[in-house]
């Protein structure tokens, strides 16, 4: 998938018809909808564990980088009739969410203009019981180097409460730190843990880190966003492509790779084959699920 390579207009192994396969989603790079579909077919073996039995929120960008995007939670009419869904009741009504885990579901979403994959932190079978905590590190400076430094602070704090953690690029300027946990705590408790740990870190490093939700109040610091852990909230999945220049991929990292010099956009749909040839730093992610209760009690005592 090299820049400005014209798509062939066909995807022989695709399990569904594709509309407008040659439509250019990234004009500067020349990547098309077909290129995006090929990427997801290639990485689906690694993507599947992070979308299986998870509710998805859809970010639809039918014109790629050239047009507007809109969010949709209700299953679109254009999905295959047998697409798995789950009805979730909210304060203002009910929503029939698409449930991930099938290649045909992922490709059907791409066919509708979904570039990124936005997932819940819980399974559809237990929607209020997350199996990971996410720390979403958003640098006000716009520099990944600041997010990388903040990530190492978060890792140190998690190590102190005996929790293993896994970093990944957000696919844009930030860093995500995931903590695999055993299902049990309610989503409110999981968000409380992320919020409490974030506040402790912001107090310890006030010039670097902040819990300020107001952008104007962040003043160049890295925001430790805990809200990805709330009920019905989402985060981009590992191996999700982002609607951004160069078609970057939210890429699982080893902690040894989290350095200020890392350039997240170097991981993109045109270069990702090289990444797939290397050892997966998250290969044991779900085997490392750990109880959260002791760590939550520990941060409450701080």
Image (spheres, rainbow, N blue to C red):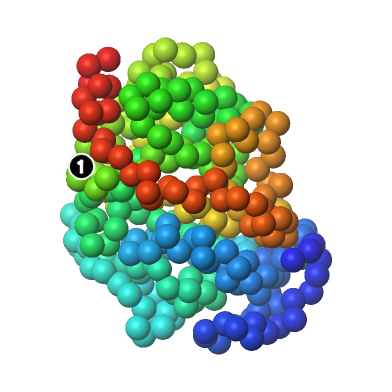
Q: Which residue is mark 1?
A: 185
**In the rendered view of the protein, which quadrant contains the N terminus?**
bottom right
Look at the picture and state if 89 lies above or below 131.
below
Q: Position of residue 220 (x, y in %)?
A: 56, 22
Give the tally of numbered discs: 1
> Image point 54% across, 56% down: which residue?
239
At mark 1, the secondary structure is loop
Look at the picture and state if 252 lies above or below 243.
above
Quick one: 298 or 145, which is closer to the camera? 298
User: Where on the picture, by quarter, is residue 225?
Assistant: top left
Q: Is residue 211 visible?
A: no
**In the rendered view of the protein, which quadrant contains the C terminus?**
top left
Q: Position of residue 96 (x, y in %)?
A: 28, 69
> Image point 51% across, 29% down: which residue?
151
> Does residue 9 appear left or right of residue 73 in this picture?
right
Q: Is residue 284 visible?
A: yes
> Image point 30% across, 25% down: which residue?
196
Look at the picture and state if 179 lies above or below 251.
above
> Image point 26% across, 38% down: which residue?
291
User: Where on the picture, by quarter, is residue 174?
Assistant: top right
> Does residue 3 appear left or right of residue 274 in this picture?
right
Tell me the crowding category of disc 1: few under 14, some 14 to 19, or many 20 or more residues within 10 angstroms, Cα based.
some
Q: Position of residue 242 (x, y in %)?
A: 58, 54
């Amino acid at each position: 998938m090299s820049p400005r390579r014209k798509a062939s207009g066909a995807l022989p192994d695709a399990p569904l018809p594709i509309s407008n396969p040659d439509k250019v989603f990234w004009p500067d790079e020349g990547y098309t909808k077909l290129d995006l579909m090929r990427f997801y077919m290639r990485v689906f073996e690694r993507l599947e564990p992070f979308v299986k039995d998870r509710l998805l929120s859809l970010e639809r960008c039918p014109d790629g980088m050239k047009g507007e995007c809109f969010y949709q939670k209700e299953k679109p009419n254009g999905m295959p009739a047998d697409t798995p869904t789950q009805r979730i009741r909210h304060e203002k009504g009910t929503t029939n969410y698409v449930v991930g885990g099938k290649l045909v579901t992922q490709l059907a979403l791409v066919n509708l203009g979904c570039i990124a994959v936005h997932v819940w932190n819980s399974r559809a079978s237990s929607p209020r019981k997350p199996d990971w905590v996410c720390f979403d590190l958003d640098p006000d400076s716009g520099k990944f180097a600041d997010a990388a430094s903040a990530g190492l602070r978060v890792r140190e704090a998690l190590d102190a409460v005996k929790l293993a953690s896994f970093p990944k690029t957000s696919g844009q300027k930030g860093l995500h730190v995931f903590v695999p946990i055993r299902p049990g705590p309610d989503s409110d408790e999981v968000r409380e843990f992320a919020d409490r740990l974030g506040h402790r870190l912001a107090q310890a490093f006030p010039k670097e880190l902040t819990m300020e939700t107001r952008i104007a109040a962040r003043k160049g610091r890295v925001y430790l966003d805990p809200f990805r852990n709330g009920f019905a909230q989402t985060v981009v999945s590992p191996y999700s492509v982002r609607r951004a220049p160069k078609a970057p991929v939210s890429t699982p990292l080893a902690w040894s790779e989290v350095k200020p010099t890392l350039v997240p956009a170097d991981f993109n749909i045109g270069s990702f084959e090289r990444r797939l040839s290397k050892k997966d730093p998250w290969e044991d992610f779900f085997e490392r699920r750990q109880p959260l209760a002791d760590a939550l009690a520990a941060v409450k005592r701080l």
